[in-house]
């Protein structure tokens, strides 16, 4: 071993993250990282196969730090499903939608695309990243299925499809950002998503005393 420091790898990742935040991923070099981390370049070369791998690992960590608040909301949604608390479920869903569709999460509208491109540049990191995303996808599919079982979400909704559409669209929103034809706020997206997924209450199932039932008489 060139360097016995057990924290060298973490130090390198933190320094590289600082450089990316300041100058973007193109500004990362082993020489600059070594200088800031007070390490020999050989130490970085021993721990990372390439500059591409280093950047990919940093960007993967950046992604999960960025979406951590959304994952916290997901945990609340899962609890609501388990507790059969419909009000808390929809509150969490609406909060999640607004957070996911708010451009303020990133410094610029292409930030998330550049980040994902960096992650995808390294095959090993990409594979690990996919495994972590699959865990999130599975959680969302389970949430939708649980909400269907509780009678909150339309039974005809395909849990996998709605999960794929939402994730793909929320990432792809950078394409429509700034469009004069598609001026959609996070709140509009929230209302649309809830409208198409929420189970409709038919008049025949309403209590006779309900205003909607009385109006239909």
Image (tube, grey):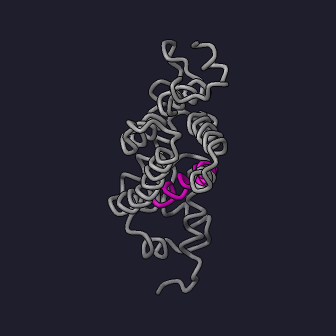
Q: Position of residue 153 (x, y in %)?
A: 49, 38
Answer whether residue 2 is magenta in the image: no
Q: Residue at x 51, y 42 (%)?
A: 151
> Total of numbered circles in the picture?
0
Residue 65 visible in the snapshot: no
Q: Position of residue 75 (x, y in %)?
A: 60, 55
Q: Residue at x 37, y 51 (%)?
A: 120
> In the shown orientation, is residue 99 left or right of residue 42?
right
Residue 205 in the image: above or below residue 216: below
| Residue extent of the magenta highlight | 57-75
Q: Residue at x 57, y 27 (%)?
A: 191
Main secondary structure found in the magenta portion: helix
Front one among 78 and 65: 78
Answer whether residue 70 is magenta in the image: yes
Work out which residue is located at the far left of the displayed protein and give it.
123
When asked about the image quadrant of residue 215, the answer is top right
Residue 78 in the image: above or below residue 207: below
Q: Residue at x 46, y 87 (%)?
A: 1
Q: Position of residue 107 (x, y in %)?
A: 61, 38
- Quadrant housing the C terminus: top right
Residue 120 visible in the snapshot: yes
């Amino acid at each position: 071993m060139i360097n016995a420091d057990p924290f060298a790898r973490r130090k390198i990742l933190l320094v590289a993250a600082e450089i990316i935040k300041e100058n973007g991923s193109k500004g990362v070099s082993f020489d600059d990282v070594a200088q800031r981390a007070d390490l020999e370049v050989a130490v970085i070369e021993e721990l990372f196969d390439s500059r591409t791998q280093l950047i990919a690992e940093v960007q993967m960590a950046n992604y999960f730090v960025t979406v951590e608040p959304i994952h916290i909301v997901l945990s609340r949604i899962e609890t609501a499903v388990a507790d059969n608390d419909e009000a808390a479920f929809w509150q969490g869903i609406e909060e999640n939608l607004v957070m996911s569709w708010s451009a303020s999460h990133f410094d610029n509208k292409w930030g998330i695309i550049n980040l994902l491109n960096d992650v995808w540049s390294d095959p090993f990191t990409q594979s690990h990243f996919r495994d972590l995303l699959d865990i999130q996808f599975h959680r969302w599919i389970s949430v939708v299925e649980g909400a269907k079982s509780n009678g909150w979400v339309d039974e005809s909704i395909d849990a996998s499809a709605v999960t794929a559409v939402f994730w793909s669209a929320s990432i792809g929103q950078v394409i429509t950002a700034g469009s004069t034809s598609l001026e959609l706020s996070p709140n509009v997206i929230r209302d649309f998503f809830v409208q198409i997924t929420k189970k409709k209450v038919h008049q025949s199932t309403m209590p006779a005393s309900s205003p909607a039932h009385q109006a239909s008489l």
